[in-house]
Amino acid sequence: MEINKTKFTKELMATVLKDYPLYRRVYTDVPKTLPMSLTDLLPDVIYHECEHEKCGRSQPFNNADSRYLDKTAAELEKVVAENSQRVVGGLGMLGGGGVPSYGVYSIHYRCKVCWFSELWWWIEIGYDTAQGTYIEKVGQSPPLQLPIDGRLIKKLGEDQKLFRRAQTSISQSYGIGACAYLRRIIQNKIDTLIKIYREKRVNQDAGEEERKALDQALGTTIFDDKLKFIKQELPKGIEVKGHNPVSLMYDKLSNGIHDLTDDECVQVAQDVTGLLTEILVGLEEQNESKRRYNEGIKALAKKPTTGLS
């Protein structure tokens, strides 16, 4: 399997720390100054939400006392002294003084404004003979909180428990589990999804035949029959660039569960999360806006025009 290697930058490191789920590897070269100095590894400033009462908003965080954990400073100095006369070559993971850069690092940042809030990450820098040097986040405090649209939570009802478990799985790179949770939500919400699309098509003046087809999908009680009907019988009006969104989400999740890796499934789960939000929240809000617009037009049309010249 060919691995795409990403060029190392401090911006990449900030993204790994702030946004990457646990255990997701990024293959990249790392600064040669490791582990003696972390200056070339760490961003000068990381902007992050500060929850302290003095702040309560995004603030700059600065490096506090980040360090290499596999050896103490004294042990590192000893290794450097022992290797000072040696010429160290080429695996790309030997750092300053001939000390291997791989191992676990504790990354500690503190809010520059209040000095109370702290961010901790633990990363591993390792080397795979087939794929090269990698950085992997193995711990984080406070834990990664993926943004969850409150409007979506309301729409999900009891299924919000499954959704939160899916998001937790994404944050820890358990992509296959996330796909399983999201697929269950599709199964549970299939009628809701069809109803939303039915209303959209009615607002777009769908014909009687199309409405009957949608009603037939709603009238079927077996999920597999609903899904089969959606794939084969629903009109083209429900599709986006040739894709039926409901069956597309379900098929991609199923494929992930059976055939993809955890990392690949994380991306699938994130994509489905976005589409599910757009359908359950975005399209329903559009439908509601259209309803209010139509009702307003009807109400205005009924107003008497007496007295106007």
Image: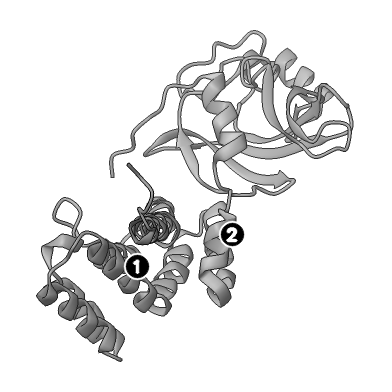
Give above or below for 44 relative to 218: above
Residue at 31% from the left image edge and 69% from the top image edge: 254
Give above or below for 288 relative to 54: below
> Which circle marks residue 73 in the picture?
none
- Dividing the picture into quarters, in which one does residue 108 lie? top right
Residue at 34% from the left image edge and 33% from the top image edge: 4
Q: Position of residue 173 (x, y in %)?
A: 51, 54
Q: Nearer the viewer, residue 124 or 166?
A: 166
Check the picture and name the quadrant holding the N terminus: top left
- The type of residue carrying mark 2 is Thr
Side of 262 relative to 224 (left or right): right
Crowding around mark 2 (Cα neighbors within 10 Å: few <14, some 14 to 19, many 20+) is: many
Q: Position of residue 42 (x, y in %)?
A: 65, 21
Toward the top, the furthest residue is 85
- Dividing the picture into quarters, in which one does residue 116 lie? top right
Q: Disc 2 marks which residue?
A: 168
Check the picture and name the quadrant holding the C terminus: top left
Side of 163 relative to 82 (left or right): left
Side of 262 relative to 221 (left or right): right
Q: Nearer the viewer, residue 59 or 115?
A: 59
| Residue 233 appears anywhere in the view | no
Residue at 40% from the left image edge and 56% from the top image edge: 296
Q: Position of residue 110 (x, y in %)?
A: 81, 28
Front disc: 1 or 2: 1
- The type of residue carrying mark 1 is Ile
- Dividing the picture into quarters, in which one does residue 55 lie? top right
Q: Disc 1 marks which residue?
A: 196
Earlier sequence position, callout 1 versus callout 2:
2
| Residue 85 appears anywhere in the view | yes
Toward the bottom, the furthest residue is 221
Q: Position of residue 99 (x, y in %)?
A: 64, 22
Q: Quote the CA–CA distance across marks 1 and 2.
A: 27 Å
